Amino acid sequence: MSAQELERTAAAMVAEGKGILAIDESFPTIKKRFDSINIESTEENRRAYRDLLITAPGGSDYISGMILFDETIRQSASDGTPFPKALVDQGIMPGIKVDAGAKDLAGHMGEKVTEGLDGLRERLAEYRELGAKFAKWRAVITIGSGIPSSACIEANAHALARYAALCQEAGIVPMVEPEVLMDADNTIDTCYNVTERTLKTVFNELYRQDVTFEHTILKTNMVISGKQCPTQADIQEVADKTVRCLLNAVPAAIPGIVFLSGGQSSALATAHLNAMNKTYSSLPWPLSFSYGRALQEDCLKTWAGNPDNVEAALKVLLHREKCNSLACRGEYSEDMEKAA
Ligand code: 13P
């Protein structure tokens, strides 16, 4: 793949009014999601659920790409079409999660480092054959007493840079994802400081490993109050602090920034993105979404593993996709939730 093709892929991922649907839950995570609706995590149930998400009619108006899990990229829709082809046929780009998960960081209690570099060149070559246009690697940064440590941020940033370089070598756009978790009791300002420090370290490492910024998509957390924090910042404060943090830490050459939802409610994740795009109309990069839970939650509950509920679940999914598409343009309003 030429440099121009990498550029085109990256631009298409964040095309106006479009975002990414993350359906790359690992085996333990999809089991957790299925447990919540009392469904067993069998290969067929996972396939049936992903079939619904992938073949949802109308999704391509709002969704530019989907991130698949290793099992999913090898599975097929009910009519026998391989999932990557089913996506391409609708004009949606297949993506793939390539990290091997966040593991305990030796010598640093409570902190994680993401693994998966061994054999990555060969895996990327196979994923490219299977149709992947972009690949995601998620690093996890935890806020707590005395953490994150520099050791944790630097180890994760280095791994992200090594993975991103391998992706570009393979003709695949890296979706670099450092996620500062929002589960603790920290204030929004602590989240700001940790996110800024993390992003600056990540971009420094990307530079040192000769990763081309123009061919890299950033996926990151919003700057937000920790879930356990007694004072919760309002929507406008989240929008203002997130944008200010990004302006201070993300090079203008990056073609686009997408957010993870990280445990925010579906409507709040949409409202935050909307406030950013409504308030700030001339940023160096488009701001879009790459949500997992905030796009899937209502759909998963409505489906509940029952084929009779597929139609209703599709309607719910399309509604969330449309709301987030409007949020990319700053045109979403909470009234749209009542009408749904
Ligand atoms: P959430 O939106 O559920 O945080 O998931 C996005 C994702 O892909 C995390 O890697």
Image: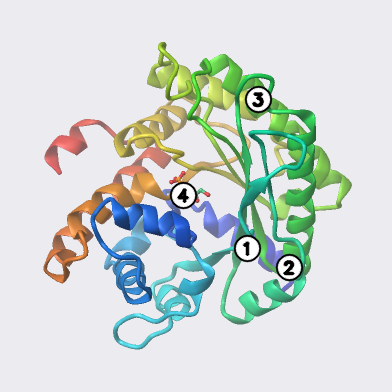
Q: Quadrant of residue 152?
A: top right
Amino acid type of the residue that numbered disc 4 sits on in the rendered structure: Glu
> How far apart, in angstroms, are the residues tagged by discs 1 and 2?
8 Å
Amino acid type of the residue that numbered disc 1 sits on in the rendered structure: Val
Q: Secondary structure at mark 2?
A: helix
Inspect this view and state whether residue 25 appears. Answer: no
Q: Earlier in the sequence, mark 1 or mark 3?
A: 1
Inspect this view and state whether residue 295 appears. Answer: yes
Where is residue 176 shown, x and y percent of the image?
65, 49
Q: Earlier in the sequence, mark 1 or mark 2?
A: 1
Residue 333 shown left or right of residue 148 in the figure: left
Residue at point 30%, 35% (across, down)? 267
* Residue at which label 3 appears: 194
> How far apart, in angstroms, are the residues tagged by discs 1 and 4?
26 Å
Q: Earlier in the sequence, mark 4 or mark 2?
A: 4
**Residues at discs 1 and 2 in contact (Cβ within 8 Å):** yes
Q: Identify the disc placed on residue 16.
A: 4
Q: Secondary structure at mark 4?
A: loop
> How far apart, in angstroms, are the residues tagged by discs 3 and 4?
30 Å
* Residue at which label 2 appears: 120
**Residues at discs 3 and 4 in contact (Cβ within 8 Å):** no
Where is residue 163 shown, x and y percent of the image?
74, 58
Quadrant showing the C terminus: top left
Residue 42 shown left or right of residue 170 in the figure: left
> How far apart, in angstroms, are the residues tagged by discs 1 and 3?
25 Å
**Assess mark 1: CB under 8 A from ligand 1?**
no
Q: Residues within 10 Å of mark 4 (few under 14, many from 20)?
A: some
* Residue at which label 1 appears: 98
Q: Viewer-nearest of labels 4 and 2? A: 2
Amino acid type of the residue that numbered disc 3 sits on in the rendered structure: Val
Q: Earlier in the sequence, mark 3 or mark 4?
A: 4
> How far apart, in angstroms, are the residues tagged by discs 4 and 2?
32 Å
